[in-house]
Structures are given as C-alpha cells and as structure tokens.
Amino acid sequence: MNLRQRKKCTKRLMEAVRREDAAAVSVLLRAGADPNVPDRDRTTPLYQASVNGAAELVRVLLAAGAVPDSESGRGTEGTPLCAAAAWGHNTVVHLLLVHGADPNLREDQGTGYSPLDWALRGDHSQAAGILVAAGAKRAAHTD
C-alpha cells in the first residue's frame, strides 16, 4: 500500500469509527488500515472508540493490534483508558485492561490525571472499582 492509499485508508477508518460502524472498521483493517495511525488532529481510532464507549469497536481495534496506552490528541485528549474511565464506560475500561492498558498511566506524558482520578472525578464508582481491582493507585496530585 502506497502512502496515498494509506492516508485514504486512515481517513476512512476514522470516519467509520466516528459512525460506530464496526463492519466497515473490520473491512478497512483487513484491507490494511493501521489501527494506530492518528488522524490530522492526532486522534487515534482507539481513543475515539473509547471516549464514546463503543465496546465492539474497541474489541475490533484491539484485536487488530491497536496499542491500548497510546496517547491521543494534541494535549486535549489523553489515553483510551483515561477517556473510558472519565465517562464511566465500564465495558471499555475492562477491555482495555484485559488487553494490557496500564491502570496507573497518567495522561499528558505523565503529568496529568490517571484513569482512577478520572473515574473518581466523574463519580463513576464501578469504573473506579474495575481499575482498583486491576492495580490502579490514586495519583499524587488530584486537584
């Protein structure tokens, strides 16, 4: 696949993720789309699926090799696990942890909140419980 085809595939993959079209995402991944390539805004497909609680898309992306701890965006997003925890998407939190997401990885290259901090700030006790069971510890600074 040449560079132009790869860019087109990446754009189509993100469009399918935003539409939460798991079938299209699967087809694009089989066609060679890379689940780790961010869009122009530096948003990764896994982050986009995680922040929206799209568990089926998260499953598909992780199965295709999406890296669960990749940070997304230009300082305004973070990690998929932080996003899922912040919004209380418990199934996605669980899926990310099962696929190796670090429950203590703080976003913003280690200077921001941890997934547990986000879960607690959003009053998502079930997400917080899942994270604690996976070994999450409260970050030193919590506002």
Image (cartoon, helix red, strand yellow):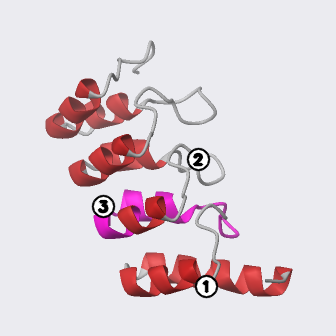
Whichever of callouts 3 and 2 sits on the residue coming sooner in the sequence is 3
Q: Residue at x 50, y 86 (%)?
A: 27
Disc 1 designates what residue? 31
Q: Quadrant of residue 58?
A: bottom left
Q: Residue at x 41, y 46 (%)?
A: 99
| Along the line of sight, the residue nearer the viewer: 89 or 63 | 63
Q: Position of residue 38 (x, y in %)?
A: 65, 64
Figure check: 27 above or below 105: below
Looking at the rendered image, the quarter that the N terminus falls into is: bottom right
Q: Residue at x 40, y 31 (%)?
A: 103
Whichever of callouts 3 and 1 sits on the residue coming sooner in the sequence is 1
On the rendered structure, is 6 left or right of 80?
right
Q: Quadrant of residue 60?
A: bottom left
Looking at the rendered image, the quarter that the C terminus falls into is: top left
On the rendered structure, is 105 left or right of 32?
left
**What amino acid is labelled 2 in the image?**
Ser
Q: Position of residue 12 (x, y in %)?
A: 59, 85
**What amino acid is labelled 3 in the image?**
Gly
Residues shaded magenta: 38-58
Disc 2 designates what residue? 70
On the rendered structure, is 48 left or right of 127?
right
**86 inside magenta stretch:** no
Mark 2 Cα shell of 10 Å, populated few (<14), some (14-19), many (≥20): some
Q: Secondary structure at mark 1?
A: loop
Q: Position of residue 19 (x, y in %)?
A: 40, 82
Q: Secondary structure at mark 3?
A: loop
**What amino acid is labelled 1 in the image?**
Ala
Disc 3 designates what residue? 53
Separation (CA) of disc 1 from disc 2: 22 Å
Q: Secondary structure at mark 2?
A: loop
